[in-house]
Image: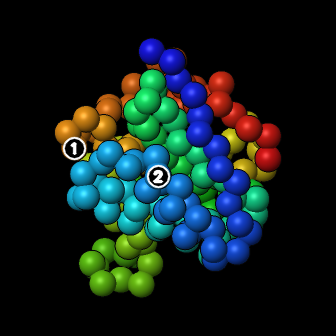
Amino acid sequence: MSQYLHVTPLPSTGAAVGRARAVLREVLRDATPDDLYDAELALAEIAGNAVRHSCPPYVLRMVMVGEHPVWCEVVDGHQGGLAAVLDGLSPAGAPGCDEVLADCGRGLMLVRVLSDGCCAAYPLRSGRAKAVGFALPVAIGAREPVRLPRGRFEWLAHFAVTL
């Protein structure tokens, strides 16, 4: 089955979040309302974090297998903060953010919960950018297991863009 990357440059402002959500709604037009809501909320969190805590350029990337979107991520223009993002996506959560009502780390916790733990952050090969993403719902609310054929995220290597 063919794989390709759906790439959308995002505005360098807070409008990036709305644009990312609009693109996602179009790509997931056949999803159930619950799956679409979960995916939109997770995407809004990672796009908002990129705008708030990193720098442009911002790019929305969705991996498509055949006609099915299986992975969604936001790439930003800075690798800084990668360790904090990884902490926030981990089952243990961000250090010091144990409370449900804490002021930090909730957004990434939501991404982890809404994606059933199928989420990740990784540096791009250029060394100047990072990606934060999550698995999208596929057929009947299930999530496609992320299969890593050779190692961590090498399956995305042929989709790499230079930032």
Please name the amino acid that badge 2 sits on.
Glu
Query: Is residue 98 placed above or below 37 in the rendered structure?
Result: below
Where is residue 112? Give x, y as percent: 34, 56
Of 32 and 123, nearer the camera is: 32
Please name the amino acid that badge 1 sits on.
Gly
Which residue is depicted at the point 74% across and 69% down? Answer: 12
Q: Is residue 127 visible?
A: yes
Q: Earlier in the sequence, mark 2 or mark 1?
A: 2
Which residue is depicted at the point 51% across and 61% down? Answer: 22
Where is residue 86? Give x, y as percent: 49, 54
Query: Is residue 9 placed above or below 17 in the rendered structure?
Result: above
- Give the number of marks: 2
Q: Which residue is mark 2?
A: 26
Of 102 and 47, nearer the camera is: 47
**Crowdedness near tag 1: few (<14), some (14–19) or many (≥20) residues, C-alpha within 10 Å:** few
Where is residue 128? Give x, y as percent: 78, 50
Q: Quadrant of the N terminus?
A: top left
Secondary element under disc 1, as helix, strand or loop, is loop
Secondary element under disc 2, as helix, strand or loop, is helix
Which residue is depicted at the point 30% across and 48% down? Answer: 31
Q: Which residue is mark 1?
A: 141
146 displayed left or right of 21: left
Tell me the quarter of the picture where residue 55 sits: bottom right
